[in-house]
Image (cartoon, grey):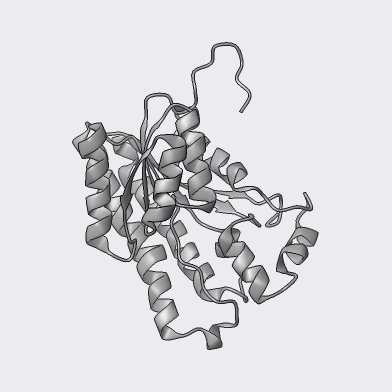
Amino acid sequence: MVRVGCMERLLEGKTIFITGAGRGIGAAAARLFVAEGAQVMLAARSEEQLAGVAAETGASYVVCDLADPDAIRTAVERTVTQYGRLDGAFNNGARGQPPGPMDELSVDVMDELYAVNLRGLWVAMVAEVTAFRAGGGGGSIVNTSSIGGLMPNPALPGYGAVKRAGHSLTASAAATYGPENIRVNAIAPGTTLTEMLRDWDRATPGVIDGLNAQTPLRRAAQPDEIAQAAAWLLSDRSSYVTGTVLPVDGGLAA
């Protein structure tokens, strides 16, 4: 990020909790948020991945399975215990699905999508709001959605469905907690070079090239480009933005 003169770093002095922080967009966010002045608590299932990102950034970490409500609450509480408060949260962790039509999606996979991507998101948001209130009120939440939740998603129907449901949670939370100066937004990444996308491309060769051909910018995003949008929404520079789902997709959903 280019800084003008002595402009304060974007997240100077803030404490931020990140889920899905072991790789991809979450790891990129950890690097960016620390560089922009934040104290960061990383959370994900893989301790090995978390330890690597923590060693690189100086952030702290806690192992957390988003399918386990108690683990989510404990992770948020650990952030407050260690840093004394919580100012922002980037709910980025998610479970993907094998590509294919909805009639080939198993009940077990659909249940896992719900448990992680929707119930886990709800539990995290409630825990984060509780932490904001304990710190005197005010805070910002950013949820990672997908443009697959903004349009028909025949290749990933279960994933798209729970992401669209997350838009409703985002809007409801923004309306409910706005009077407490708690802002809640979501970002909807398009084609982004993460492990989840590469898994899809291996299962369906040519997917990345096909998506890039439909994207006005004619390329996929790097994870850092998505993290930049989350950082802005978590910062005070977006102080009058709440209840929005921001596409970060190179124009794919335009």
**Left or right: 53, with 229 as reference point:** left
Q: How many marks?
A: 0
Q: Is residue 37 visible?
A: yes
Q: Position of residue 20 (x, y in %)?
A: 43, 54
Q: Residue at x 59, y 57 (%)?
A: 194
- Name the quadrant containing residue 156: bottom right
Position of the C terminus by quadrant: bottom right
For the point 39% across and 73% down, the residue is 112
Res 241 visible: no
- Up the image or down, 35 lies above or below 141; here it is above
Q: Quadrant of residue 17?
A: top left
Which residue is depicted at the point 40% across and 34% down? 58
Across and down, in percent, residue 41 comes to 35, 41
What residue is at 46 percent from the left and 66 percent from the top?
95
Q: Quadrant of residue 184?
A: top left
Q: Is residue 104 above or below residue 243?
A: below
